[in-house]
Image (tube, rainbow, N blue to C red):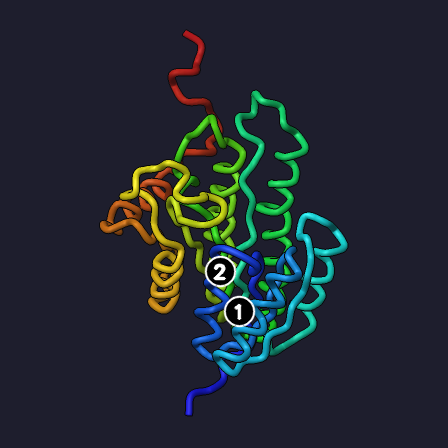
Amino acid sequence: MAAHPGIALVTGASSGIGEIYADRLARRGYDLVLVGRNADKLQDLAAHLAAAHNVKVERIVADLGDASGLARVERRLEADPAITLLINSAGLIGGGPLSAGQLDDLTRMLNINVVALTRLAAVAAKVFAARGKGAIVNLASAMAFIDTPAAAAYAASKAYVLNLSLSLDLDVKPKGVQVQAVLPGYTRTPMISDGAGLPAEIVMDADAMVDAALAGFDAGELVTIPSLEQVAAYDAWAERRVALRPHLSLSKPAARYMAA
């Protein structure tokens, strides 16, 4: 009989990608701690998953953009040694172009996409490393590679998640902790309602995206880009990124900046 996989804590579980992760992990036998803002949706999802898959499901109704709500989730993650997997799925898109000056929307988005994700990843990294096991999945986005004036801060937040995950892996992989950054392209979720008028060929169903991400997780991928057929293209980018490092900090400016 297979060992019980433990408890998965899933943020953003009341809709979209987080909800699908909750379903797929329940099918794998994980008990769940579901975090989301919508109490009714969490209740319905918890009842359905518990009945359908014979798993235990706990709900935490919390806004991760609020310090007190985030602190409650951090304490839950830190306190329970049965939690073996963190799915950092909660995310927002908002604010529009920086020139629009929508500072409150931008701040709220960054509090979720950057601050909350980082704090939860840090708590998980600490407790999982101390136990010598566990896994952290951070939902980034293919927007990490895209320059876009319409959503500059959102794209930057996802580039942050990618870079954070790469460095986190160097920290905790030797301590027995798996890290995965998932970079979906356009995905059919409430965030992109009905595909938002985008061509159908560039919008992936959320179920297919999560299934691909979990296949990448099972394969031990550090970075999973569900749409990317030629993984060598990402590997080449990563190699060029590493190759830059010896040239980025030297004692003298490059020759083109030296006075004639």
- Compared to residue 80, the image places residue 225 above or below, namely above
Please, what is the three-letter code of the amino acid marked with disc 2? Answer: Val
Query: Residue 241 is drawn in which quadrant?
Result: top left
| The one of 70 and 193 positioned closer to us in this rendering | 193
Q: What residue is drawn where x is 39% and y is 65%?
A: 214
Q: Position of residue 54 (x, y in %)?
A: 52, 83
Extreme residue in the top direction: 260
- Left or right position of 243 against 169: left
Please, what is the three-letter code of the amino acid marked with disc 1? Answer: Leu
Residues packed near mark 2 inside 10 Å, few (<14), some (14 to 19) or many (20 plus): many
Q: What residue is drawn where x is 59% and y is 45%?
A: 114
Residues packed near mark 1 inside 10 Å, few (<14), some (14 to 19) or many (20 plus): many
| The one of 146 and 234 positioned closer to us in this rendering | 146
Asked if residue 215 shows in the view, the reply is yes
Query: Looking at the rendering, in which quadrant would you find the C terminus?
Result: top left
Q: Position of residue 228 (x, y in %)?
A: 28, 49
Q: What residue is drawn where x is 50% and y is 37%?
A: 156
